[in-house]
Image (cartoon, rainbow, N blue to C red):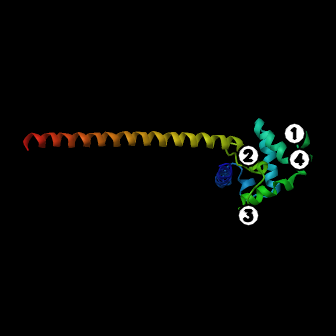
Amino acid sequence: MQNNTLKKYKKAIINKYEIEKGGKYFDYLYKPSRGKLRDLCWLIFENNPTKDDLNVFSNFLSLDFDHTKKNKFKEKKDKFRPIETFFKGETDLSNIDAINMAAILVDFHPRPFKKFYENSKTEEIKSVKRIEKVKAVFEKKNSEKKLEKKKKISFFLDFKSMFF
């Protein structure tokens, strides 16, 4: 289940990337490079990031976000190479922190993966409940039809016995 959900998460991020590369951050995403992705990351994190996003930043770069440490951050350009090749369709991401950073760069929600996974489980439960409800309605209608058929047969037999 989790592996299948992770594949869905990555596919959803790529789909969002395809939309976003022509949008607001076109200059950074249209032909992504490590440097462009790093610069986009800084831009995004300068603008009031969430606690979850800050955790992804810290886990991915082994560095806490700090406005005064931009030079230290600039040294982390190579960390963005797997995301660059992922967006270009050259490789698949396996590092969950890199996957979550890719989600941040294209503003995919729900993120991080844990939230996506929990949301998927909730949707799956809702789907199962809908299926069970439809099945119950179908079974009820089917049993009503059978009962109606039995009544008709019983009536016919009673009618037949009266005259024969």
Q: Can residue 21 be seen in this view?
A: yes
Circle number at residue 148: none
Q: Nearer the viewer, residue 101 or 26?
A: 101
Point out residue 60 in the picture as x, y percentages from the top left corner.
83, 47
Closer to us: 90 or 7: 7
Q: Distance between the residues labelled 3 and 1?
A: 32 Å
Which amino acid type is shown beneath numbered disc 1?
His
Res 159 quadrant in image: top left
Single out the residue that lies furthest toward the bottom.
90
Residue with the mark numbered 4: 73
For label 4, the crowd category at 10 Å Cα-Cα, with few meaning under 14, some 14 to 19 and many 20 or more, is some
Decide which of tag 3 and tag 1 comes sooner along the chain. Answer: 1
* Cα–Cα gap, marks 4 and 2: 17 Å
| Distance of label 2 from label 1 (alpha carbons) | 18 Å
Q: Earlier in the sequence, mark 3 or mark 2?
A: 3
- Residue 112 placement, left or right of 150: right
Alpha carbon separation for disc pair 1 and 4: 10 Å
Q: What residue type is labelled 4?
A: Phe
Circle 4 sits in a helix, a strand or a loop, which is it?
Answer: helix
Q: Name the residue under label 1.
A: 67
- Which of disc 1 and disc 2 is earlier in sequence? 1
Amino acid at the residue labelled 2: Ile
Which sits earlier in the primary sequence, circle 1 or circle 4? 1
* Disc 1: CA contacts within 10 A as few (<14), some (14-19) or many (>=20): few
Q: Is residue 78 left or right of residue 44?
A: right
* Rendered residue at 84%/53% (across/down): 79
Above or below for 21 versus 145: below
Residue 90: which numbered mark, if any?
A: 3
Name the residue tied to disc 2: 104
